[in-house]
Amino acid sequence: MKEKVYIDSTILSFYHDKRDELKSWIEATRKWWEFEMPNYDCWISDAVFLEIQQEEYPNQQEVIRLATILPVLESTPEIKLVAEYYVQNFLMPNDLLGDAIHLAFASFFNFDYLLTWNCNHLANANKRKHIRVLNGRLGLSVPEIVTPLELVKEEQT
């Protein structure tokens, strides 16, 4: 059985990004998408669609097309409560369409991984303990929060 990966909007965005200063992250994203993604059971949420459909979202049409190939989790009142709990406990910024909701989806639906390029609020070693404590209080699993550089299958020799 394949491990489950929740993909947040940063991955879709970086796939189509064109900024030179992010070239290595863009290449890593595209390489992961092509070579590693087939090894996993990958999902996004309706929160990802809400984000990428916002007015003036960079490369919006390409990002939306990429998102449509993935299965979509639907929001529930419980997920919104979990995201609110993260914000109330100062884990995430007060933007329920962003980081808090993605972590809530990945935790609530028991994903093995949350794949992101958000190293400020999600893929951040300084956040891991706080996430474990809050999810423990809520009785939720704690997904490994990783970047595409970290989520690669080990080659068998």
Image (tube, helix red, strand yellow):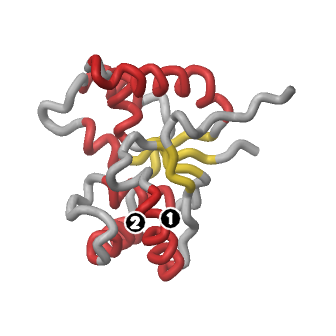
> Which residue is labeled 2 in the image?
79
Q: Residue at x 56, y 20 (%)?
A: 34
Query: Which residue occupies the extreme bottom position in the image?
Result: 137
* Residue 10 coordinates in the image, percent (x, y): 35, 38
Residue 108's mark?
Answer: 1
Amino acid on which the number 2 mark rests in the picture: Ile
Residue at 39%, 40% in the rendered image: 117
Q: Is residue 127 above or below residue 56?
A: below
Give the x, y percent position of residue 145: 50, 52
Instruction: Give the residue furthest to the right.
Output: 157
| Residue 84, image x, y percentages | 30, 71
**Where the N terminus falls, by quadrant?**
top right
Tell me what residue is drawn at x 40 percent, y 66 percent. Answer: 79
Query: For this rendering, which residue is in front, 71 or 154?
Result: 154
Q: Disc 2, disc 1: CB below 8 Å?
A: yes
The kind of residue on which mark 1 rests is Phe
* SS label for mark 1: helix
Mark toward the start of the polypeptide (2 vs 1): 2
Tell me if 74 is positioned left or right of 71 in this view.
Answer: left
| Towards the viewer: 23 or 72 | 23
SS state under label 2: helix
Instruction: Please indicate whether residue 126 sits to the left or right of residue 151 in the image.
Output: left
34 above or below 115?
above
Is 135 or 45 nearer to us in this picture? 135
The label on residue 67 is none
Image: 143 above or below 69: below
Location of the C terminus by quadrant is top right
Q: Residue at x 45, y 76 (%)?
A: 134
Q: Is residue 138 above or below residue 145?
A: below
